[in-house]
Image (spheres, grey):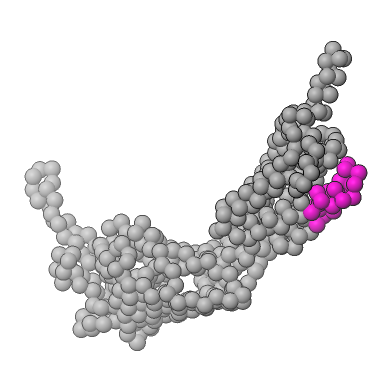
Amino acid sequence: MQDSLERLTSSLRSSQMLRLLLVGFLALLLQIPIEMIAELVSERQERRQEAVAEVSSKWGNDQVITGPALVVPYTHRWTEVATGGQEVARTEVRNAVFLPERLHSRGSIDSETRFRGIYSVPVYRLSLTVEGEFARPSFAEFDVEPEAVHWDRAWLAVGISDARAIQEETSVSWNGQRASFLPGTGAFLGGVVGIHAVVGVAEATERFKFSFPLSLNGSLGLYLTPFGQQTVVELRSDYGHPSFQGNWLPTERSVSATDFQAKWSIPFLGRNYPQAWRAEAKMNEAVDGSRFGVELVHPVDHYRMAERSVKYAFLFILLPFAVVWLIEVLVGIRVHPIQYLMLGGALCLFYLLELSLSEHIGFPLAYALASISIIALVAAYSVAVLHRLRLALLLAAGVASLYVYLYVLLMNEDFALLIGSLGLFAILAGIMYATRRVDWYKGGSRPPESPGSS
């Protein structure tokens, strides 16, 4: 039994194939702590989302402004056949929704950062002026008699997703007359949250101009809807990292490190709902699908960066192991499996340092400090393991090159596949070149070079 164990140990020491399999097994074994770190990243992301939700619930959520729209009630009459066969006349007050011919919104988004513990949340104050013009509503397509329309009870409705964040009372100028806004939107889109003002529609008037200011708080994002036949929206902000979202991108935009300006010009032909409909028609999904706007995003989401970097962990543990294995093959130094695990543990610790530091000092600086710390640790330990300063510095330089390479991958998400493919090609080519003269049939020894060979 003792002889068999000794032969197995001797075989393991001399067979490069077995040692290579052992190195691969150790790299797989180190995926256990890597998976634990990945779960920790997810947990910290969830805690950040909880902090964002808590701040938003008190300040104001992301805002969706739907409208304005003119809602006109009318009396609908029909007859029903009762149980006994006699006809019974029925009446019901229903509503029709009309959208403006012209809609122009301009405003400013004044941002600031609120904190909940170590987590930061971008919030804003929106100052918006909305103006436009309605044509006189026509009920011809609805088959409604003119005398059944209640023109004097018409109201202007504006949907605001988080109406409690409205900061000031406001009123609408309707053909020069002032009308105060009241809570709720009535029958507009099934009673969405928002405000309304009773404006009435004068019988002798064909055009109705309106304008009103709106001041409200919000966080993370602002969305609007293209309710005009021609919708124009102009926004400016002191936030330098906008992410334009929705079905339409700005026709004009200017983004700098400290602010942005954007302008949307949207014709009604690109949306999936008409200029007028009965209130009972289900238009909510179509209207929601036409939103456009801007989100205030973090310049660098360190949790997302940490999550992406952990995905490369197996490769970035295996490659330093491969360098150590090549040193064993080419130089003849033997490295114990426990020493491999020690180096692997240091490489795993990089991701934990990167995550914990980035929560306090930002991702770029955290990445630099974590990289420098692990490179120094690997270099110091490699001197004791490899017994040669030159080889230790070579391994440390290889690890440093990998961290630089990883940072380039993280910062260039669109080109990550291309950069990764080229990098792996270069690494494999380097390994093939370094081992081109190794005689694997003789336990990995290098054959003597012939005279004149290079």
Residue 82 appearing in the image: yes
Q: Is residue 381 magenta?
A: yes
Instruction: Tell me where residue 112 appears, x and y as whole percent.
Output: 63, 72
186 vs 335, nearest the viewer: 335
Residue at 36% from the left image edge and 75% from the top image edge:
231
- In the picture provided, is 379 more to the left or to the right than 231? right
Residue at 55% from the left image edge and 75% from the top image edge:
255
Instruction: Tell me where residue 373 appears, x and y as whole percent.
Output: 82, 54
406 vs 418, nearest the viewer: 418
Residue 95 appearing in the image: no
- In the picture provided, is 197 more to the left or to the right than 418? left
Instruction: Tell me where residue 266 appears, x and y as whole percent.
Output: 36, 72
- In the picture provided, is 340 more to the left or to the right than 302? right
Screen quadrant of the N terminus: top right
Q: Residue furthest front?
A: 451
Quadrant location of residue 338?
A: top right
Residue span colored magenta = 372-397
151 vs 260, nearest the viewer: 260
Instruction: Tell me where residue 295 appears, x and y as whole percent.
Output: 53, 66
Q: Is residue 442 magenta?
A: no
Magenta residues: mostly which secondary structure? Answer: helix
Residue at 81% from the left image edge and 21% from the top image edge:
8
